[in-house]
Image (spheres, rainbow, N blue to C red):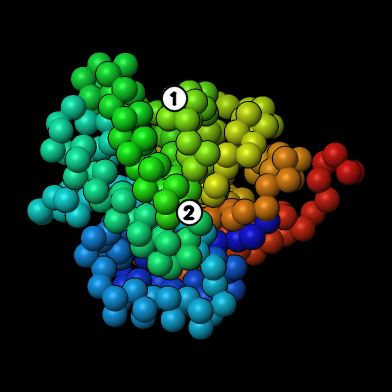
Amino acid sequence: MKLAYSSNAYTRATLLDAIDSIGRLGYDGIEILCDHPHWFPGHVDQRELEAVRDRIAEYGLSVSNLNANTANVYFDPLPPENVFEPSLSSADEGFRRWRIEYTTHAIELARAIGSPCVSVTSGHPGSGGLPTRGLELMTDSLKRICEVAEASDVRIGIEYEPGLLVERASEVLELIDRVGSDRLGVNLDIGHSHLSREDPGQTIRALAGRIWNVHVEDIAALKHFHLVPGTGDMPLADYVDAFRAIGYDNFLTVELYTFPDQPERVGADSLAYLRNLCARPSSADA
């Protein structure tokens, strides 16, 4: 498994500065935030694209994912925290149409920069009215997005999260079945799975073959706050063993947007911990 670091830890730096830092730290890859202050899909010109592509190549990095989970740039002024609107499940047709277009622009960027996938989220449970109606709207939005993804050879990963419309692995699998595209899978945030009290082995086996990227952090006392891996109480070794068991060989992407004042320090600590964790024999071999 390869290790990447999400640029959403660097929201007080430019994307080029984030690439420099992540490259110097020694990660294998970078996830690019498709939101303020990094890439705004539909507003990235060719010069900026080439500058980012050249800088990534300079450090020998790969792109693990384009993170289009949020679209805070829609709002002026920016919201104080992520609001997950406009969403793909919104009852507001204008919101939904805008978010579909935003995501298709992210797919175009993914193809241009060589990212294998783009991640998306579902919005709040009441965004579409009743949750059942929200799921219908989300399904329709994903069908349109997957048509573009199929033509662009890019994958779409749904990131589920407690408190959102889609908050469990079983719900992602239901959406995948509804949409019917082999381009649709999951951007698996293991902290979110832990908060939903999902069993690591059972969950990862259920999602096998549809995990495009993995977000890694630690969690303590079931509080949704992303911590440096190894500093919380998640059974991270169990997750690594479960990924090995299904032959997962894509990225483990560290996501620490919670530490904007010290992204380099927490990035270095995370890399050291995860390298050691991934190098240890699995419990099944012990």
Residue 85 visible at all? no
Q: Quadrant of residue 275?
A: bottom right
Q: Does label 1 or label 2 sit earlier along the sequence?
A: 2
Dots 1 and 2: beta carbons under 8 Å?
no
Residue 46 located left or right of residue 189: left
Residue 115: percent from left, percent from top:
47, 61
Q: Depth check: 32 or 143 in front? A: 143
Q: Depth check: 73 or 157 in front? A: 157
Residue 143: percent from left, percent from top:
36, 35
Q: Residue furthest front?
A: 151
Specify the amino acid type for callout 2.
Asp
Residue assigned mark 2? 153
Residue assigned mark 1? 178
Quadrant where the C terminus sits is top right
- Relative height, residue 56 to residue 254 (above, below): below
Residue 172: percent from left, percent from top:
47, 29
Specify the amino acid type for callout 1.
Arg
Q: Please tell me which residue is depicted at 55% across the width and 61% down the height of the picture.
A: 4
- Relative height, residue 124 to residue 1 (above, below): above
